[in-house]
Image: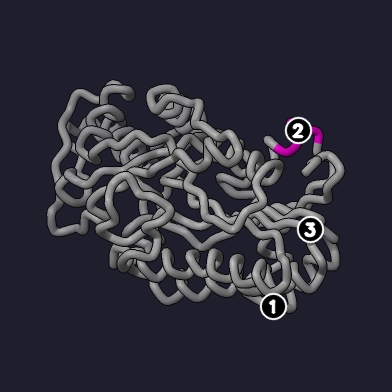
Amino acid sequence: MDLTTQRVLVTGGAGFLGSFVVEALRARGVREIFVPRSTEYDLVDGAAVRRLLADARPTLILHLAARVGGIGANRENPGKFFHDNLMMGVQLIEEARRAGVAKLVLTGTICAYPKFAPVPFSEDDLWNGYPEETNAPYGLAKKMLLVQAQAYRQQYGTNAVVLFPVNLYGPRDNFDLETSHVIPAIIHKVDAAMQQGRATVALWGDGTPTREFLYVADCAEGLVLAAERYDEPDPVNLGSGREVTIKDLAEVTGRAMGFKGRFTWDTSKPNGQPRRCLDVRRAKERFGFEARTSFEEGLARTIAWWREQGGARS
């Protein structure tokens, strides 16, 4: 697909990942990009979705909008996370079909994988078990994008592709301790401890779970490459292929920030998924995507951005 000739709708385009996707599209020479705001178009409401497509008249949709958060937010809002993410996806795909949109690129979530999927996670194992309980409602709602995309391709010929990004991080992330994911949460807590002269930082769980992280700009590049080059029904992982324990993540982050103290672990809080690491071969084989940003470089950029915004003092 020649992106420069497309009218592109980016749901969630004003958000963390979306802002980088819009930048990647503009770098490709895309001139017509429509970024809806939730105050104007509530994608949970079918009438608002129909109005959005009538206003934007897209030929390509990148669906990034989601109701998201860390373990705590998922535990407190399982019903809302399930309902809102499911309804956004179901209605957008249906209305796009009815409007004759040429292509949809949809983002799933690593939370859709079974709790005990073999590591590294292969796309072929998506259905071989139930997701980790604390984020299962969110993960299952997002996994329905894949079911619907494949069903609509079979019945209606809809060209919808579904990608499963691993945990993202980078500048412009959400650093709110109530709703953030692990990297911004650690950065925020360490910065606050340093500002207040505290020698310890308390983190959730016991530090043994593993995670894989993908720099947000790399993920944006993967999504744009899929828009250009990928037109098949199979789901595709987007990741870096590097696995790290939460304990090691905390230590690396502390050193990068100049923290001289130590971390304590609140084992009354959940660990979440035991391990996360993706098999990333399919993305390279199908549309040439590989993560380019090293974790150390991406982490340094993220910390620098946070401090530029005022850090824990802001």
User: Which residue carries the number 1 mark?
Assistant: 46
The CA distance from mark 2 to mark 3 is 19 Å
Q: Quadrant of the N terminus?
A: top right
What is the x, y in percent for residue 154?
65, 70
What is the x, y in percent for residue 157?
72, 66
For residue 102, the mark is 3
Q: Nearer the viewer, mark 1 or mark 3?
A: 3
Quick one: label 2 or label 3, which is nearer the N terminus? 2
In the image, residue 184 lies in the stretch drawn in magenta: no
Residue drawn at x 51%, y 63% as measured from the top left = 67
Residue drawn at x 46%, y 72% as measured from the top left = 82
Q: Which residues are magenta?
A: 25-29
Label 2 neighbourhood size at 10 Å, few (<14), some (14-19), many (20+)?
A: few
What is the x, y in percent for residue 168?
45, 43
The CA distance from mark 1 to mark 3 is 20 Å
Q: Amino acid at mark 3?
A: Ala
Give the prevailing secondary structure in the magenta stretch: helix
Q: Amino acid at mark 2?
A: Arg
Please, what secondary structure does the residue beneath circle 1 have? Answer: helix
Quick one: label 1 or label 3, which is nearer the N terminus? 1
Q: Is residue 44 above or below residue 110?
A: below
Of residues 49 and 61, which is closer to you in this image? 61
In the image, residue 28 lies in the stretch drawn in magenta: yes
Q: Is residue 38 visible?
A: yes
Q: Are marks 2 and 1 in contact (CB under 8 Å)?
A: no
Quick one: label 2 or label 1, which is nearer the N terminus? 2
Q: Amino acid at mark 1?
A: Gly
Residue drawn at x 33%, y 33% as measured from the top left = 191
What is the x, y in percent for residue 247?
20, 37
The answer to whether 90 appears left or right of 177 in the picture is: right
User: Which residue carries the number 2 mark?
Assistant: 28
